[in-house]
Image (tube, grey):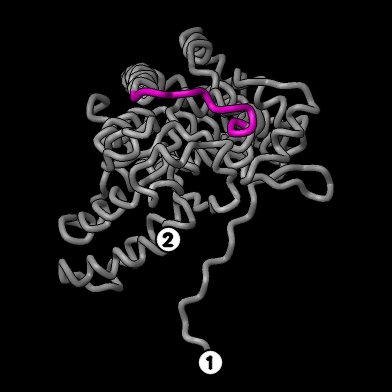
Amino acid sequence: MSADLVIPSDLLRPIYDLLRVMPGTGGILRDLGEFHLVLDTNVLLADIRWMIQKARSPGVRTALLETLESGTTVGYFPEEGLAEMSAKLDAFSQRYAIPRGDLETTWRRYRLRLRVLATTDVPRARYFVASALRDPTDLPFVLLHASTGTDAVCSRDKDIPAAGVPTVDPQILDRIRQLARHQAPRAAFVIVGASVVVVPVASLLAVGVGTVDLFRRAPRWAQVLIGAGALTSVAYPRSRRYLARNVRQAASKLIELASEAAPILVVLQQHAEDGRHSAASVKADIEATGNFDAPTSSAAAFRICARRDTPLTLEQISLDLAIEGLVHEDREALARALHEHPHLERLADGRWRKRAARAPASSAPAP
C-alpha cells in the first residue's frame, strides 16, 4: 500500500503560502523547489489551447498549470503583454473555432497565479541593452526577468536566448511537475504532524527512539513546522488540558500505529531524497542555459518582498538576504538599492513592499 502512495501536488500550496509569510524561509523554499520564471506569451497560449481542446477531464492539467497552482513555479508576466495576449486570444478564437469566453475563462485561471508587473519604469540601460534584441516586442519580458531576478525566461522564442538572456524550453516544466509530486508527500507528512495537536511530547517519546531519530533526520523545514504545531498545542490552554487528560490514550494509539506507519515513513523519506535531487538537477540545468547571473542585491530583495506579500523593514530584508546566503550589503547601500528598484516602494512607516499592480483598464464602452 505504501509503495502506491500518491498525494496531489496541490498539497504544496498551503505549505508554500505558510513559508512565504515566515521570515528567513528562502532556503527552505529552495530545498522544496521553487522556480521563478517569466512566462512568454507563446507558452501561455499553447497551454490555454491544450486545456480547452485536449484535456479529457476537468481534473487534467498541463505541467505549467499544475506547478503554478502548487506553488512550485512562480510565474511572472509583463503588464505590457496583456494587450498582445488579448489580441492573440481573439485570433485563436477565430482560427481554431474556440468560443472567446472559454479562452478568457481559462486565461483567467493562469493570470490568477501570475505576478503581473509593468516594465515601463524599468531603466532600460541599467538592466539590458535593448539593441541586442532582434524582436522589440520581447523587451518587456527581458526587462522583467532582469529587474526581478527570476531564474530564467520560459519561451520557445529563439530571439530571447540569442540576445544572451537565460531561457528555458517549456519541456522543463514536466520535470518541475515531477519534482512537485515528489515533494507533496513530504508536505502531507508535515501537515498531519503539525495539525494533530492532541499528541504531546510525552506520547511521542513513548513510541521509542526510532521516532526521535526520524525527527532528527527530517528536513529542517519539517522540523520547524512540526515544532510549531507542538508548541502551539502546549501553549494553548484548552489543548493543554485535553492533552493532560488523554496522554495515556494518545501514547497507546501511537504505539499501536507505529508498525503500520513505518513503511509509509520509508516511502516519504525516499520521496524526500528524490525531491532534493530533482530540485538540484533542475536548478543546475537552468543555470547551464548560458549567461546565468546570480540576482543582484536589489533583485534578491524584490524576490523576498514579493514572496512574503507583506511590508518588510530594512532589517527584515537584510536578515533574509543573509540567511539565504545572497549578496548582502551594508544598511545604507541596501536602502539605496531598494529605493532604485522599479518594482519596490517605501511606505510612510519606512517598510518596503512590492509595488501594487495597476488596476486593469476597463474594456467597457464609455456611457
Residue in view at x 54 percent, y 36 percent = 127
Q: Amino acid at mark 1?
A: Pro
Identify the residue at image location x=71%, y=47%: 345
Q: Is residue 101 above or below residue 222?
A: below
Q: Is residue 157 visible?
A: yes
Left or right side of 260 for 140: right
Residue behind mark 2: 82
Q: Quadrant of the N terminus?
A: top left
Residue 210: x and y, percent? 46, 9
| Mark-to-mark CA distance, 2 and 1 | 24 Å
User: Does the magenta-highlighted stretch encompass residue 295?
Assistant: yes
Above or below 254: residue 60? below
x and y percentages locating residue 75 in the rendered image: 43, 44
Magenta stretch, main secondary structure class? loop
* Residue range (magenta): 289-300
Q: Secondary structure at mark 1?
A: loop
> Which circle's residue, 2 or 1, is located before the other in the chain?
2
Residue 218 painted magenta? no
